[in-house]
Image: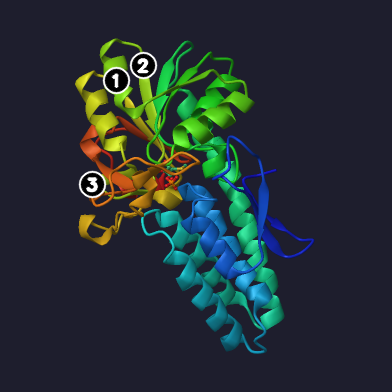
Amino acid sequence: MRTIEWDDSDSSVKMIDQTLLPSELKIIKCKNIAELCEAIQNLRIRGAPALGVCGAFGVALSAQLSSASTVEGIIKDMKAAGDAIKKTRPTAINLAWGVDRVLEVAEDEGMDPRLIQNIALEVAKEIADEDVATNKKIGKNGAKLLRDGDVVLTHCNAGRLACADWGTALGVIRSAVADGKKITVVACETRPLNQGSRLTAWELHEDKIPVQVIPDSAAGFLMSEGVINKVIVGADRITQEFVYNKIGTYTHSVLAKEHNIPFYVAAPISTLDPESWEEHVQIERRSEDEIRYIGSNKDLNVPLGVPILNLAFDKTPMENVSAIITENGVFYPPILLDEIILG
Ligand code: MRU
C-alpha cells in the first residue's frame, strides 16, 4: 500500500507506522483528529509531502465526523481540526498547505454539509494521487543528473515513506535505477531518530537498490576520500534564502561545497514558500528525551541534569545548493522561487 491512504471501509486514515520500522511493518488507522495529531507528533507519519497528504485527509476526516447540519457549522469544525493539525509540527510547509487546500475548496464549492463531506474527501484523495504523479516527474527530471556508477549520499528519509509513494530525493534515485543506471546510496543514519538507517535503508533494501548506512559524522571523511559523487536531499520548506531540512543537512552542504561535490535538493512546488523570510519560519524543537535516552531499553545516553538542544531541522543557504529538482524541471543558480513556480 501507499504510505498513507484513505480507508473507505471505515472512513479512517490508514498509514504505515514509521516508528516501528525496520523491525515491524504495521498499518495503523486514525479514526479521529486526536489520533491523527498524535501520529504526526510522534512521527508515525512524517516527511513533508506525506504530512501534506495527512493534513488533507485530516480535514476530510473532520468533515465526515462533523455532526453539524449547516454549512457554517461543518466549516467551523473543519477549521478547528485544521488548526489542531497545523499546530502539530511547524516546519514542513506542506502540512498547512494540505490542510488549507481542502478547506479552500470546501468553502468555495460546498453548498450543503453532505456536499462538503464529499468534496473534502475527493480533494484529499486528489492530493494523494497528485503527490505520486509529482514525485514521478521530480524523479524523471532529476535522474538526468545521475550517471551510471554514481555513489549518492542522502540524509534523513526523502523516499516513498516521506510521501504517498515514490519519494523525492529517493524518487530521483529510483528513476535513475529504472533508466538502467547502477546507483549506490550512502544513507546517513540521521540521529537522533534515525530516519536514514531505519527508513531509507529499509525502503531501498526492499527495492533492491544498493544502500550502505554510515554514521552522520562519517560523511566528510568519505567525501574527502572521493567516495561520494553527489548529494541529494529533500526539503521541508524552501524560502528564497534557505532550504529547511532535517538537522545535519547544512553540514553536508558545507562539506559538499568544500569537496566540489554537487548538492541537490529534490522537492515539489508545494514545499516552496516564496513569501516567508527567516524570521517567519519556526524550526521545530523536539523533546530532550529523544536524545537523553537510547535504545528500546531507554538506557541513559546523557546524564540527568545536563541540558539538551534537540532541533529537528536546520537551514542551508541557497548559495550551497547546486540545483533544485522539482516537477517543473531542474533549476540552477541563481535560483529564483518565482521562476520555479512559473516553470
Ligand atoms: O522529522 P521528519 O522525519 O519529518 O523530517 C523529514 C525530512 O527532513 C525530510 O528530508 C523532508 O521532509 C523531505 S521528505 C520528501
Decide which of tag 3 and tag 1 comes sooner along the chain.
Answer: 3
Q: Is 189 on the left-hand or right-hand side of 43?
A: left
Badge 1 residue CB within 8 Å of ligand 1 = no
Residue, disc 1: 261
Name, please, the residue furthest toward the right.
9
Residue at numbered disc 2:
229
Residue 1's x, y, as percent? 70, 43
**Residue 318 appears left or right of 185:** left
In the image, is the residue at mark 2 within 8 Å of ligand 1 by its beta carbon? no
The answer for how far apart the CA atoms under marks 1 and 2 are is: 6 Å
Query: Which numbered marker is on residue 241?
Result: 3
Task: Residue 43 in the image: state x and y as whole percent.
Answer: 49, 51
CA gap between label 3 and label 1 equals 21 Å
Relative to 273, say whether 21 is above or below.
above
Instruction: Characterize the local packing of mark 2: few (<14), some (14-19) or many (20 or more) Cα atoms within 10 angstroms.
Output: some
The answer to whether residue 16 is above or below residue 75 is above
Q: Where is residue 189 in the image (x, y as percent from the top left)?
A: 41, 30
Q: Is residue 300 left or right of residue 183?
A: left
Disc 1 vs disc 2: Cβ atoms closer than 8 Å?
Answer: yes
- Secondary structure category for the residue under label 3: loop
Disc 2 versus disc 3: nearer the observer: 2
x, y (%) of residue 263? 32, 28
**Vertical comparison of 82 with 93: above or below:** below
Q: Which residue is drawn at 31% across and 16% down?
A: 222
Alpha carbons under labels 2 and 3: distance apart:
25 Å
Mark 3, residues whose alpha carbon is within 10 Å: few (<14), some, or many (≥20)?
A: some
Tell me the SS state at disc 2.
loop
* Residue appearing at x 67%, y 84% in the figure: 67
